[in-house]
Amino acid sequence: MEFLFVDGKEVSNQSRRLIRSHVMKGKNLGKTIHRPSRRSPARATTTQAVQFVTKAPETQQQNARTGGDDQDCLIGDRSPGETITDITFPVGHRFSSVGLPIEVNPYMRRFITHFFTMLEASLYPPEICLLQNRSIWLQYMMTDEAFLHCTLATVATCAKCFYDIEAENSPEALMYLSKAFRLLNEKLSGPRAIWSDEIVASIVSLSIRDQLRGDYGKGRVHLDGLLRIISLRGGFHRVTKVELVQKICRTDIDVSLHDGTRPRLQYSAPNRLLPLLGPSRWRSRSRLSELILERPDSSVLDSIILDLDSIMGFLNQTSTLDKLSPQVYQDTVLGLCYRLLECGPLNGSRPADALVNAVHIGLTAFMTTFVIPFGRRRRVRFAALSTCLTEAIQNQSWTFEDSHQGFLVWLLVISGMTMFDQEDRIWLLPMIRRTAFKLGIGTWDELLSYVMKYPWVRKLHDNAAKELWDEVNLVEVC
């Protein structure tokens, strides 16, 4: 008898192929296998993304609506003759799939996603703005480590301010902050430091972080240093990114609203929305012009009200096709805020007429609804504006007039939505209830009919006002 021994140690490549082929014969029995042809290359699969395209010149109205030829925000497929001017992130993965210069934990990536989602929703409300597909902040995060650490420290602060998550003083958040200061100091000691937009963006981020923490003293120090750098660069025209200029101006406005001082900057960007409104100027005038008609110190304020009424009329009738580009929207908001603050600083010389003063303060509070988030998640309180609002509302020289009750209820609702917190609700909610009773207001629809006679954007303000009205209905007034 002949014995055969199988040695598995010395198996050649050919033997392995034969063994695998024999095993797969049984598994593939009765199946039809389609293998790709080696002669024709496989079709490349690409992820379709929204593209920025440069189109042929449009009419003046289309340019005003989309931000002009230099900031085209038209969305769609590319047609022959159009050239791609920018590459955007894949749809659905704008925040979670970006490559960062350092390793970030998964939960911090979630915070980044929530932070930018909240930030875009407040800066560019989707109800009236086109989608912001090109973010310089994400580009800075991907290319500049100092800005990334500043952003992560700001994100940790926002986790406390807006989500009640204790992450601000965590070891990881403090590590990001210390690294941000170290990297910024290293960059600022370089010969070309002041010419870097990334350094300017990093300092803006630190200023915003301190303001969210309520430390406006440190935020003011960062803003002073930032304005010094911009001055050394030769002015704002040296800052190449419009979004960065707008962010600096928003920080300047926040400090002015808190300190009550005159803004340090002047926003001279042309208002591209007003020409869009045409000669009719959307003639839905609010009751504010009637209130201050022929009163002293009201001429400048009346011109602001005229433009504001036209813009509010346009925004209330905005359809999906008429949405504004983010840049045009921010130009409009910043321009109105600067005009109101230049009209009279909160802690400076105020109008002698109590009603004109109340209208100015109310419009300033109203414009903050376009600057930062408001409603239940609002955690930012501007000290000077809150004080001026309280004094204006409690001034009995105009609040007892029957002809002023409609304006008073609008002012109270705006105040409750913006500057006043839970402690102020002790006196605010009963005052809204009493004023509504005088006007015969018993339902939400009746209240809405009154506030819409004054500056109001239903898509932005209705939900927060409805929540406030529900709280008012729970109050019993003796």
Image (cartoon, rainbow, N blue to C red):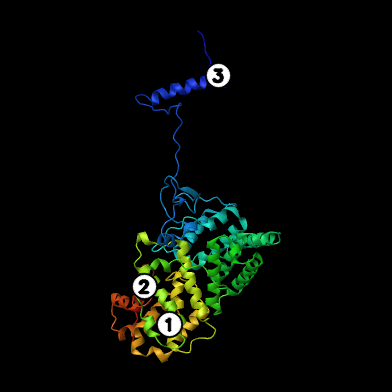
Q: Which mark is residue 359?
A: 1
Residue type, numbered disc 2: Glu
| N-term-proximal mark, 3 vs 2 | 3
Q: CA distance from mark 3 to mark 2?
A: 80 Å
Compare residues 275 and 121 and report the one nearer the observer.
275
Kindly state the secondary structure of the residue where label 1 is placed. helix
For marks 1 and 3, the one nearer the N-term is: 3
Report whether residue 421 is seen: no
N-terminal-most mark, 2 or 1:
1
Q: Position of residue 164 (x, y in %)?
A: 48, 67
Q: Is residue 209 left or right of residue 321?
A: right
Q: Amino acid at mark 3?
A: Asp
* Residue 408, above or below 167: below
x, y percent for residue 286: 36, 78
Can you identify the residue that label 2 sits on? 467
Residue situated furthest bottom in the rendering:
397
Q: Is residue 167 above or below residue 396?
A: above
Residue at 49 percent across and 74 percent down: it is 337
Q: Which mark is residue 7?
A: 3
Nearer mark to the viewer, of 2 and 1: 1
Tag nearer the camera, 1 or 3: 1
